[in-house]
Amino acid sequence: MPRTALHISLILSLLLSLASCTTESLRAPRGEVSVAYLWSLRSERSVTIKNDIYIIGYVVANDKLGELNNAIVIDDGSGGIELKVEGEEINDVVPLFSRVMLRCSGLNIGREGGKTVMGRAPTAEYVVDRIDRDDILNYLTLLDKQDAAPEGERVTIEQANTDKMLRYVTIDNLLPIEEEQSLTWCDSEQSPEEYRTSVRHFHDLSDTLRVVVDGACYYASERLPKQTCTLHGIVDWHDGDIALRISAHQVFKQR
């Protein structure tokens, strides 16, 4: 190839490369994004978020009643994401049902079973490491504190699937299956005051719903409802399958 033609070819290649980089740069969002967009970033086991992006949503699960420990779940209406946090009494720092802004740059995102989790870059076998409780406000900004729960999307048991993962939902017309109606929310350990995380089963005559309850929650020793009820919580992933995790002990009897 003549030298002039070679130079032109190299210049064209360089221009195409620059154009490609510019296009990718334009595609990379800045500012507010949705949780659904964050889900799309899970191309590998654990990915560092480099863009200057943030999400805004509601804290729909935390350790206020011991229902979810070492984490909070944020739902923005497009999806839910679990932020791993190391420490106790996280609710004192990030109150349940508060509206928050989470700055994502520098954090890692990955899959844990069927759900999406965020935290620090992993240093061992975990997908992400936990953020220390005392550092959480370096990433989170409290926009609005409120006691009332946000409106949960009403779904059926069948609709509480992976598409709703970590979403805050409401499910009506539920009743514990017959063989569990005499049980407490959690099974007890050898000590009568110690309970372990347990799965209970509710049905709506058509389908059966797994409900996971942390042994540390304050109502672990309470009996399951014996009449039709409504449950409010997050669609979670526990022990290899979908399970509802109740939020704020919202179990309402139906007439």
Image: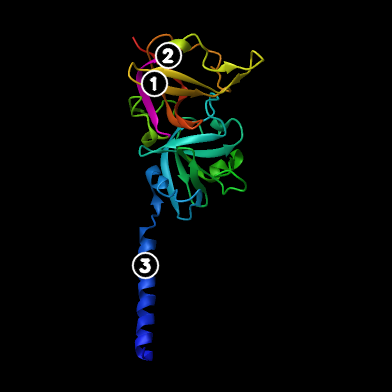
Quarter that holds the C terminus: top left
Query: Comparing marks 3 and 1, which lies closer to the viewer?
Result: 1
Residue type for callout 3: Ser
Crowd around label 2: few <14 · some 14–19 · many ≥20 (10 Å): some
Crowd around label 1: few <14 · some 14–19 · many ≥20 (10 Å): some
Q: Earlier in the sequence, mark 3 or mark 1?
A: 3
Q: Earlier in the sequence, mark 3 or mark 2?
A: 3
**Res. 91 image quadrant:** top right
SS at mark 2 in the image: loop
Marking on residue 142: none
**Res. 132 image quadrant:** top right
Residue nearest the viewer, comparing 46 with 219: 46
**Dominant secondary-structure state across the stretch colored magenta:** strand
255 w.r.t. 3: above or below: above
Residue nearest the viewer, comparing 208 with 171: 208
Q: Which residue is mark 2?
A: 177
Marking on residue 20: 3
Q: Residue at x 39, y 76 (%)?
A: 14
SS at mark 1 in the image: strand
Marking on residue 208: 1
Q: Earlier in the sequence, mark 1 or mark 2?
A: 2
Distance between the Cα atoms at labels 3 and 1? 50 Å
Q: Position of residue 136 (x, y in %)?
A: 56, 41
Do callouts 1 and 2 mark residues in contact (Cβ within 8 Å)? yes
SS at mark 3 in the image: helix
Q: Residue at x 40, y 33 (%)?
A: 167
Q: Residue at x 62, y 46 (%)?
A: 124
What span is in magenta?
166-175
